[in-house]
Amino acid sequence: MTPSQIKQQQENLLRLSQQYTQQDLDMVLLQNKNITYAGIQSLNHPLYAKCRVDLKSALNEFQLACAFLSQCIRSKAINHRNNSYHLKHKLERFVGMYISNGVIIAGAIALGIKYEVDGPNVWPAISKELPITDEVNEIAMAIRKSAA
């Protein structure tokens, strides 16, 4: 994949992300009390309230997470290769900004992707083959380095 194709893929992701709204994120928060910016968290956790507020205000991250996850192929089985924490890093490297574990989980919930909880992370029912590969991420990071 060439740098111009990667730039196009990034622009497409940004364009696609605009269809997801604060209302979508608010609905996830309303229906899932244990989802926070940090991931799955107990309501008794000392940082729970702050992490909920942080997630509510992370619309841009949520939109990108939804756009990325919408491009993943869903599977019937839970994928024990790419958990939410791994997916957040894939997306971060591609877009060049911080993405929280919680917004990946919120995105999966908003899109109706089945998942299995594993501590603060989830294992989503998506294909092991992701739309953003390690090779694509290496080129995306190199593009950002050369532009700096």
Image (cartoon, rainbow, N blue to C red):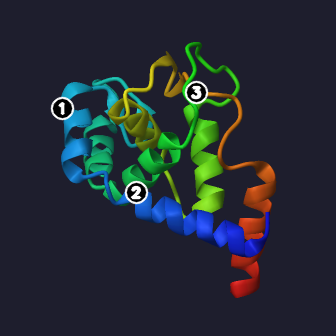
Whether residue 74 is visible to the viewer of this picture, yes or no, is yes
Going from N to C along the chain, the mark reached first, 2 or 1, is: 2
Q: Nearer the viewer, mark 3 or mark 1?
A: 3
Could you tell me residue 88's position as x and y percent? 57, 45
**Residue type at tag 3:** Ile
Whether residue 96 is visible to the viewer of this picture, yes or no, is no
Q: Residue at x 50, y 41 (%)?
A: 69
**CA distance for labels 2 and 1:** 21 Å
Q: Compared with residue 68, is residue 106 higher up or lower down, i.e. above or below?
A: above
**Residue type at tag 1:** Leu
Residue designated by label 1? 30
Residue designated by label 2? 17
Going from N to C along the chain, the mark reached first, 2 or 3, is: 2
Q: Residue at x 59, y 56 (%)?
A: 92
Residue designated by label 3? 126
**CA distance for labels 2 and 3:** 19 Å
Q: Residue at x 64, y 38 (%)?
A: 86
Callout 1: helix, strand or loop?
helix
Task: State if disc 3 and disc 2 touch (CB < 8 Å).
Answer: no
Could you tell me residue 52's position as x and y percent? 28, 41
